[in-house]
Image: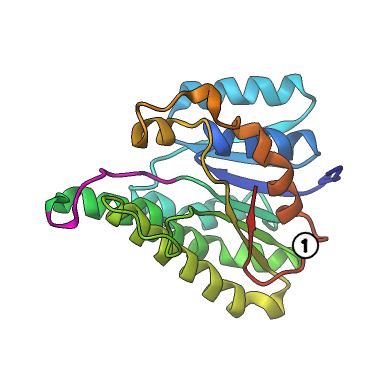
Amino acid sequence: MDADFSGKTALVTGASRGIGRAAALALAKAGAHVLALARTVGALEELDDEIIAAGGSASLIPADLAEFEIVDQLGPALSKRYPRLDILVLNAGVLGELAPIPDIAPKVWRRVFDINVEANWRLLRTLDPLLRASGAARVVVMTSRVSGEIARPFWGAYAASKAALEMLARTYAEETRQAGVRVAIIDPGAMRTKMRAEAMPGEKPESLPDPNEIAPLILKAASTAYDGIAQKFRL
């Protein structure tokens, strides 16, 4: 869809590759100033170069979402430079390991929930004042088909974390509807990403859609034309 996000500020997590990178590029090309958050500095710098080449603008936030003290300070730090946050794309996530539930290592289970659930709760918590200040903020949450709809053997940690994330998103949507915040949940399906390759190592990458194909749906969910309350979208 053709959308104009000029004057908007958008924060994208996991922005250095895959779906996050596609979202950051699409939002920047549509006029938004993108706050690109990811762990890998080099990949963020490459993204910044591409955004600039496309005529857009971005600020880079090299950060590990597992470092909760840094996450908690993100809102106060950003509020010194930005009066509001118009778009938040919660994309970063980890797969963990595919294993029977009794065999999942506790440290793996903890990391999956730290990144996929707790980090997102902390992001919503620290960025809430900026989102409310927008008056029409849009929060886009990336999920998966295994998040409570399909019980698939060996996906226990990832599936449970995504189910928890969806309920977190729906609850936040109800709590902020009077403030003009709207939440959308997007299930991209199988895409040509690093996480998919980890989960399905025998799969041919060329048989899957490129992450850029999800960009129009992300723009739709991030637009003020979207007025749903935790509506779920699929590619």
Asked if the magenta segment contains residue 169, the reply would be no
Q: Is residue 147 visible?
A: yes
Splitting the image into 4 quarters, where does residue 130 fall? Answer: bottom right
Residues rendered magenta in the picture: 93-102
Q: Residue at x 54, y 45 (%)?
A: 189
Q: Main secondary structure of the magenta part?
A: loop
Q: Residue at x 72, y 36 (%)?
A: 26
Q: Residue at x 25, y 43 (%)?
A: 97
Placement of the N terminus among the 4 image quadrants:
top right
- Residue 41: x, y in percent? 46, 26
> Could you say whether the residue bearing mark 1 is in a helix, strand or loop?
loop
- Residue 175: x, y in percent? 59, 79
Report the front residue among 94 and 44: 94
The residue tagged 1 is 226
Splitting the image into 4 quarters, where does residue 64 fall? Answer: top left
Query: So how many labels did they put on this image?
Result: 1
